[in-house]
Image (cartoon, rainbow, N blue to C red):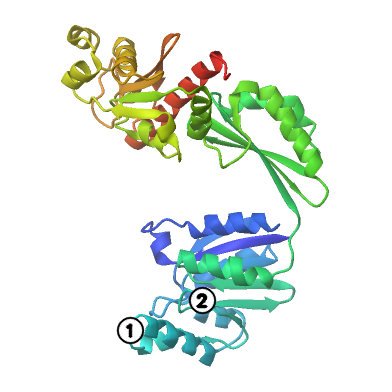
Amino acid sequence: MKAAILTIGDEIMIGQIVDTNSTWIAAWLDLNGWKVTRKLGVRDEIPEIIKGIDLCYEDADLVITTGGLGPTKDDLTKDALCQYYNSKLIWHEETWSRVKEILKRINREPSDLHKVQCYLPENARIIPNDQGSAPGMMFEESNKILVSVPGVPHEMKHLLSEKIIQLLPKGEAVEHRFVRTAGEGETVLAEMIEDIESALPSDIKLAYLPSFSQVTLRLTSYGDGKKERMDVLQKQIVDRLGDLVYSTSLDISLSKSIGDILRKRNETIGTGESCTGGYLSHLITAVSGSSDYFIGSIVPYAYRMKTSELDVPQEMLWEFGAVSEEVVRSMAEGVRKNLDVTWALSTSGIAGPTGGTPQKPVGTIWIACSGPNGTKARLLKLTRDRVSNIEYASIAALVLLRKMLLEEGEG
């Protein structure tokens, strides 16, 4: 069964806020067996809303709209739905009672604007909202369903997951399997499993979802009776990709997979971050229980800090510069010694957008990892975007650490 999502609001169309609602709704629909064919955004204008509904219905049996149900003049979703379904707004006493109850709890008196939310399309099925004043609405016509929910995220999630799910036809059974990898790009992975992918049955799809230094492979099937086949395919991919795989669960991040290895070995880690400014440590400590193995971090931005805190020789800094293999190696070794850790990571580079030279342009970043059997460094040549460079370098450092951990064995 097919579904489409229509997000309504000027604030989204001008980039004032990020549309997270449609992302959540798409995942919720997929979980419940509805295949999302389209996601649209439109302004708070009645003709645009109507056009959006028509476009969504071109290839969907279910349309979910979010936004535009508030009490102000720019909230026009109800008016658009009345035009679309040839209806009119009528007073809904039950909604008014709920609104008054909500206002009473917060010691506020109802106003005329609050009453606006109680005028609802005559032919809509009204779905009470236990977490806000605007109810959800459901329309059914010609075997098509439209559901309209508020744009407030927690209200939208409550209505869909607690109320509306009980009213919708049951979707197809859907199965997902994931293989999370680090260290190679999607092109290399595709070449490694080309024969497996070519032999996939037509009702099972494989998607590559790349991010910084990582790729998640997702197998998807619709219909009953495919669990065992999906398990077999997932195992084939895992066996083929070997050490590139760090997890088969979306709940296990790269940082957590590394932390599990360190905890199992009773080993520790620390970081020395220049250009990443603590973001690498953030990734490590975002994992609950990371205090079992993470000792601490030093952020030696200035030359003198690299020398005083990490024992980087001053003459090395002046000869090679902070952004160099020599210095980043020395930083990692200084972290390992001064923090007394098993493993140490370091970063030094030009994150941008300023500060580059012809010899070392913006995006030039060195990372290093020092462990029981030595130190390895890697040069990254990235973009001019500061935020992306910091994130990429931090994850690349984790990938380097994981590679060295596996080279020594997990036992």
Question: Tag 1 or tag 2, which sits nearer the N-term?
Answer: 1
Q: Quadrant of the C terminus?
A: top right
Position of residue 132 measured from the top left corner of the image (x, y, whole percent): 46, 75
Position of residue 327 measured from the top left corner of the image (x, y, whole percent): 28, 13
Indicate whether 98 appears above or below 74. Answer: below
Indicate whether 20 appears above or below 349. Answer: below
Nearer to us in this view, 321 or 6? 321
Instruction: Please name the residue shown 81% across and 52% down the image.
Output: 224
Q: Amino acid at mark 1?
A: Asn
- Mark 1 closeness class: few <14, some 14–19, many ≥20 residues within 10 Å: few
Q: Quadrant of the N terminus?
A: bottom right
Position of residue 170 measured from the top left corner of the image (x, y, whole percent): 74, 64
Residue that badge 2 annotates:
130
Farthest residue to the right: give it.
225
The kind of secondary structure element at disc 2 is loop
Residue that badge 1 annotates:
107
Instruction: Please name the residue shown 54% across and 60% down the image.
Output: 40
Nearer to us in this view, 220 or 382? 220
Separation of marks 2 and 1 at Cα, in angstroms: 18 Å
Indicate whether 34 appears above or below 265. Answer: below
- Relative to residue 76, is residue 206 drawn left or right? right
